[in-house]
């Protein structure tokens, strides 16, 4: 029974899609014939990705805009521009996120707010903005890029762990709310990623590569819609 979900001409939105893992995800989905909208905080990063990948896959297949996912008005504007460009959305990948390496007792409240705003509030705002189009289509996928820190506690990463636990919890609640519309919510939980590896930098065999996660994302999205797959863990060998 080969009833894999077709990705050709489907529309994906990827937060943090201009660099690192986000760019690898963008490239992988474009290779599958999807149309991809990306956002991020840095204009130069977005512009470079649009130029390079637009040249390879066609400028009409990729759209990008500066957007801080923790800002509701910016997310709403981004949504409107995506719908204007592509008409709808089928896949949302919540990839934006970062952490602070501090002990909990030494973490400033401002650091807590900054991490939680991006990693949790950003995920919530993006889901709130884009899931309604999936409900209208009665199909879709939300893929949250979480972490092993969503399942385990690590010293010097308390705020990051809390944010990723919250992201997974939000995804599980969302899954129960949108199951009736044929929408799947996945969580990818990678260990350490060699995310910003330079072209002349050797691959660290003990770390996950961006391409590994991108290929896993494509695999998940292509699976038959009758399957529920969640909490996928990835580690360097």
Image (cartoon, rainbow, N blue to C red):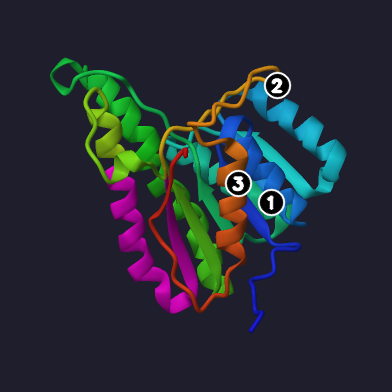
Point out the image quarter for the N terminus. Answer: bottom right
Within 10 Å of the Cα at label 1, are there few (<14), some (14-19), or many (20+) other Cα atoms? many
* Magenta stretch encompasses residue 133: no
The residue located at (22%, 36%) in the rendering is 153
Q: Secondary structure at mark 2?
A: loop
The quadrant holding residue 16 is top right
Q: Is residue 90 above or below residue 193?
A: below
Tell which tag, 2 or 1, sits nearer the viewer: 2
Name the residue that disc number 1 marks.
29
Crowding near the residue tagged with mark 2, few <14, some 14–19, many ≥20 C-alpha atoms within 10 Å: few
Which numbered disc, 2 or 1, marks the residue that appears first in the sequence?
Answer: 1
Mark 3 Cα-neighbour bin, 10 Å: few <14, some 14–19, many ≥20? many
Instruction: Note whether 200 is above or below 58 in the view shown.
Output: above
- Which type of secondary structure does the marked residue at label 3 adopt? helix
**Percent x, y of residue 26:** 66, 43
Instruction: List x then y, in percent, for residue 175.
Output: 38, 66
Q: Is residue 106 visible?
A: yes
Tell which of 212 and 227 is nearer to you. Answer: 212
Circle nearer the N terminus (1, 3): 1
Question: Residue drawn 62% across and 65% down?
Answer: 222
Give residue 66's position: percent from left, percent from top: 60, 31
Q: Label for residue 199?
A: 2
Name the dominant secondary structure of the magenta segment.
helix
Q: Residue at x 57, y 53 (%)?
A: 217
| Marks 2 and 1, how far apart at CA | 21 Å
Tag shown at residue 214:
3
Question: Is residue 194 toward the left or the right of residue 53 in the image?
Answer: left
The answer to whether marks 2 and 1 mark residues whose Cβ atoms lie closer than 8 Å is no
Residue 206: image tag: none
CA–CA distance in space, label 3 to label 2: 18 Å
Q: Residue at x 34, y 29 (%)?
A: 115
**Magenta residues, as a range?**
165-189
């Amino acid at each position: 029974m080969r009833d894999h979900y077709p990705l050709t001409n489907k529309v994906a939105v990827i937060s943090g899609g201009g660099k690192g893992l986000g760019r690898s995800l963008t490239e992988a989905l474009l290779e599958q014939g999807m149309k991809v909208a990306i956002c991020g905080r840095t204009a130069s990063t977005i512009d470079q990705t649009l130029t390079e990948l637009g040249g390879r896959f066609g400028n009409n297949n990729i759209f990008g805009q500066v957007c801080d996912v923790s800002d509701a008005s910016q997310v709403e504007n981004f949504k409107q521009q995506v719908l204007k460009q592509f008409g709808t959305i089928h896949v949302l990948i919540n990839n934006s996120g970062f952490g602070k390496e501090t002990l909990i007792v030494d973490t400033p409240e401002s650091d807590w707010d900054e991490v939680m705003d991006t990693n949790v509030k950003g995920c919530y705002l993006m889901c709130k903005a884009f899931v309604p189009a999936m409900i209208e289509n009665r199909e879709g996928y939300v893929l949250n890029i979480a972490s092993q820190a969503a399942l385990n506690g690590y010293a010097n990463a308390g705020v990051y762990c809390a944010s990723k636990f919250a992201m997974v919890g939000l995804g599980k609640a969302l899954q129960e709310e949108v199951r009736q519309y044929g929408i799947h919510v996945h969580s990818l939980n990678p260990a350490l990623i060699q995310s910003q590896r330079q072209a002349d930098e050797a691959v660290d065999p003990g770390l996950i590569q961006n391409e590994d996660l991108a290929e896993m994302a494509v695999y998940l999205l292509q699976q038959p819609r009758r399957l529920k797959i969640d909490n996928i863990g990835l580690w360097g060998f």
